Image (cartoon, rainbow, N blue to C red):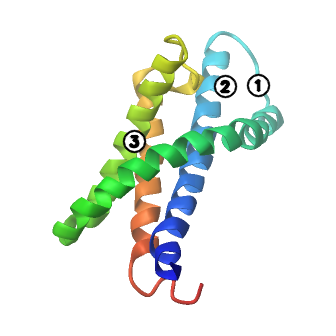
Amino acid sequence: MIRFLKTYLFPLILAAAATAILATIMQTQRVISALKDAGGTVSGSERISMTLYDAQHLGSLYFVFIFIALLVALTVAAFIARRKAGIAKYIYMGAGFVAMFVMLFLMKKAFFDVHIIAGARDGLGLILQGLAGAIGGYVFWRLRRPGLTDNL
């Protein structure tokens, strides 16, 4: 049980947290960028304030969706990575990337074809969300490596 916590659950929670934080920040910056493109003005302090607000409010809910998506994707990736240990890092990163795409697609379908994550409405926004997932996959891979969680 302790081994499961150290080598799977703890890395998964941290990977989902890292992904949620990065994805929320990127989403907020994309929305602010669109607001500026439409003629709005956003000061540096407002940008920071909006980012922190979204991190707290959107990020906490987004974390739940991301955790579920990564739970599925990284579990599958773990089985594949056992057979392809030399490229495990890339398998986990790819799984995180794909998990974000699938999650965003399913969220849109579940919520009447409305993009719930406004910063992921276009190609660049989707790629940035996918990159957040890839970084989450990297975090998961890094924390699963032997010896890194021995002192936890």
Residue 42 is marked as 1
- Residue depicted at x 70% and y 43%: 60
Q: CA distance from mark 1 to mark 3?
A: 32 Å
The type of residue carrying mark 3 is Ala
List x then y, in percent, for residue 37: 61, 15
Instruction: Look at the numbered discs 1 and 2 and tell me whether their residues touch, using CB distance below 8 Å.
Output: yes
Q: Is residue 51 left or right of residue 29?
A: right
Tell me the quadrant of the picture where the C terminus can be found.
bottom right
* Element at label 3: helix
Q: Is residue 17 left or right of residue 130?
A: right
Q: Is residue 149 left or right of residue 53?
A: left
| Location of residue 110 with respect to 59 vertically, above or below | above
Q: CA distance from mark 1 to mark 2?
A: 7 Å
Pick whichever of labels 1 and 2 is earlier in the sequence. 2
- Residue depicted at x 61% and y 45%: 63
Mark 2, residue position? 32
Pick whichever of labels 3 and 2 is earlier in the sequence. 2
The type of residue carrying mark 1 is Val
Crowd band around label 1 with a 10 angstrom C-alpha radius: few (<14), some (14–19), many (20+): some
Task: Classify residue 117 by image quadrant.
Answer: top right
Residue 99 is marked as 3
